[in-house]
Image: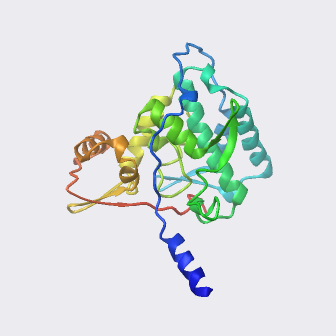
Amino acid sequence: MRSLISITLLLFSTLTFAAPKAELWAYWQPSNNANSAQISHARWQQILDKYLVTEAKQTLFRYSAVTTNDKDNLDRYLRDLARIDPRQYSKDEQFAYWVNLYNGLTVQLILDNYPVKSITKLGGFFSFGPWDDTLITIAGQQLSLNDIEHRILRPIWRDPRIHYAVNCASFGCPNLLDTAFNGQNKNTQLEKAATDFINSSKGVSITGNQVRLSSIYDWFSSDFGNQSELQTHLNQYRKGHDIQLNSVSYGYDWSLNQAK
């Protein structure tokens, strides 16, 4: 019996993250809606202002410091979003809605299970993380984090910078930005997120001729293109000498992005 348990634990300890394909959920295909109305993300901004800190260019979240009132504030924000049908808004406003919803739900998941060493410890026994768990209902549709990222954001917007916008509560993930997305700052925020990540050691680390990239570029290679296209993408944002992808390895740190 002990042998069987040991083998099972070994198998789970060696599980690797497999990125889902981008598969459009046609229900969410946005129209060219000229609606100029804006969705308020003020409650989410309040949370970011109070609990997000920057240490050595890495944004960390003070999960242990979040008060009961602020947990309720986050819950109210997510309930407010759940009452909205994002399809009734402009495409840029929809993008901001989905990104902020994803990041808010992720923070809520950690707070509901805190203390936890890694988001990968959440979800069912046979799951690597909670990404397939149903978390919210929008316009009558039950959604998981994977639904939001891989069936809405990626296939509709087809922008590799999405991977710098959604945050998985891990050290290896692109920073959770300190300003909430909205329909007006979408491109500015995406450009900042890309620049910050590609110029961080967790995004790109170079030692001699060896280049160590975030596993994001391996998992989502279909979004970043072939090696030449990825190299062009990285050098678009990289400060200093251009990157040459001759000898590449990948890595990712799944430990929780918490501020001590």
Judge whether residue 209 can be spotted in this image. Answer: yes
In-front residue for pair 191/252: 252
Quadrant location of the N terminus?
A: bottom right
Please state which of residues 150 and 99 is positioned toward the viewer in this rendering.
Answer: 150
Above or below, 102 against 25 in this view is below
Residue 63 lies, in percent from the top left, at 66, 56
> Up-down: is 87 above or below 234?
above
Residue placed farthest to the bottom in the image? 2
Judge from the rendering whether residue 17 lies leftward or rightward of residue 94; answer left or right.
Answer: left
Residue 180 seen: no
Which sits in the foreground, 207 or 31? Answer: 31
The residue depicted at 45 percent of the width and 40 percent of the height is: 22
**Compared with residue 170, is residue 241 higher up or lower down, i.e. above or below?**
above
- Rendered location of residue 255, percent (x, y): 53, 63
How many numbered marks appear? 0
Q: Residue at x 73, y 30 (%)?
A: 83
Residue at 26% across, 41% down: 229
Residue 209 image position (x, y, % from top left): 20, 61
* Quarter where residue 214 is shown: bottom left
Residue at 75%, 48% in the rendered image:
71
Q: Quadrant of the C terminus?
A: bottom right
Relative to 235, 165 lies left or right: right
Query: Measured from the top left, where is residue 44 in percent x and y?
Result: 66, 39
